Amino acid sequence: MIRWIIAIVIFLAIEIYAFQAFRTITKIRWVLCGYAIVSLLVLIFILYSFSQFDRSVGQNKQTLFTIGLFLVVYIPKILLTFVMFGEDLFRLAAGGINYFVNNDPDVAYIPSRRRFISQVGLALAAIPFASLIYGIFEGKYNFKVLKQNVYFPDLPDAFDGFRIIQISDVHSGSFDNKEKIEYAIDLINQQEADMMLFTGDIVNTFAKEMHPWIDTFNKIKGFQYGKYSVLGNHDYGEYLEWPSQSAKDENFRDIKALYGKIGFDLMLNRHTFIEKDGQKIALVGVENWGEGFKKAGDLAVASEGLTDQDFKILMSHDPSHWDIEVKSHPKHFQLTLAGHTHGMQFGIEIPGFIKWSPIQFKYPQWAGLYENTGRYVYVNRGLGYHAYPGRVGIWPEITVIQLKKGNKVA
């Protein structure tokens, strides 16, 4: 109860500051009344929806809508609140100076709000508002094909130029547009590659979420050296209250079967060799291992029989696994492919200039290529979306990685 009281107080404070900003720029009574009524109804709906969240059901269309509405409405208002609160601090400071220093009875102790500051605050608030709206209606399906060369001095000669397509974090339970998903599959099929890898999270929670999309994903073409996958944290059904352990176990079995139904060889803590022109590399796949998440991945089991001299590509869903364990592992995993972060589905990326997302404060490796003493991890930004039903600045990704012999990084 106390948490709800605190939440209501915070929301009301935000609403009061936002209303003051609007009142500063307009005195039209019906506009202000309409704004107040709509804001109150939205607040009631959001609080009610969150209070009705059922952990036995998990995320559904209403959850996505509610989270999207919350972000669209309150991120701009929170930004506006900071601007208005900052002005209040300035007004209080000016009032203190007027009272204790100037002591002039003809000057108001606390200055009135300035119209200009409210206009600046509203202009700033319009940026995330428009961006979040775009992210919901367009950004979440703004698929990008990103190409990355990675150089290794110990790459077997036969694999110089070997191309891998990577996708990750499909989250099929969030999809709502078949035409857009078919477009993504077409993009995959247009790429020239030797092998395809899928680094986990085929669903949000339930195996049934993928059933409407099986035929669509079966349109992904075959690749000469196969299609392989691993599990992600959402594939285990950990974020739900199940009626019984047997129901959870059955769902997990069905999720593992989904990968096979769309033509991927699921690798659960094991490895296989990819052979080309008499030479080979090892492809290693582990179950999910993540800091703060399920740690079912077992590198020792997955790499049993491999040496530090073997060239190895590791699929591990969560990049924290690479940061904590893989990058310093004595068996020397040359390249790790991960996903999981989604780049938080929100950020700014201008190649060569800026790459920023709030997720970087939790994950040092959150999108793209990273290196440590000659060992690399590539973090895919994800094909789908989860929680926030959109993407802003961090677009859904299909990666084409080309292995190159040499020392150059490009």
Image (cartoon, rainbow, N blue to C red):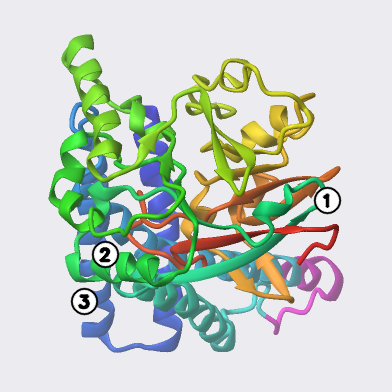
The location of residue 254, given as percent across then percent down, is 21, 28
Sequence-wise first label, 2 or 3: 3
Between label 1 and label 2, give the one nearer the viewer: 1
Where residue 406 sits, quadrant-wise, is bottom right
Residue wearing tag 1:
153
Residue 403: quarter of image? bottom right
Check disc 3 and report the residue beneath it. 34
Q: Kindly identify which residue carries mark 2.
A: 181
Q: Is residue 100 part of the magenta span, yes or no?
A: yes
Q: What stretch of residues is rendered in magenta?
A: 95-107
Q: Quadrant of the N terminus?
A: top left
Residue 101: percent from the left, percent from the top? Answer: 86, 70
Amino acid identity at mark 2: Ile
Q: Are marks 1 and 2 in contact (CB under 8 Å)?
A: no
- The three-letter code of the residue at mark 3 reads Gly
Q: Nearer the viewer, residue 334 or 115?
A: 334
Q: CA distance from mark 1 to mark 2?
A: 38 Å
Horizontally, residue 258 falls left or right of residue 282, namely left
Label 3 residue SS: helix
Circle nearer the N terminus (1, 2): 1
| CA neighbours of label 2 inside 10 A, class few (<14), some (14 to 19), many (20+) | many
Q: Residue at x 44, y 25 (%)?
A: 268
- What is the spatial separation of the Cα atoms under label 3 and label 1, in whole angstroms? 66 Å
Circle 3 crowding by C-alpha within 10 Å: few under 14, some 14–19, many from 20: few
For mark 2, give the secondary structure: helix
Q: Residue at position x 63%, y 40% from top? A: 280
Q: Is residue 362 above or below residue 161?
A: above
Horizontally, residue 323 falls left or right of residue 230, namely: right
CA–CA distance between discs 2 and 3? 39 Å
Which dot, 3 or 1, sits closer to the camera?
1
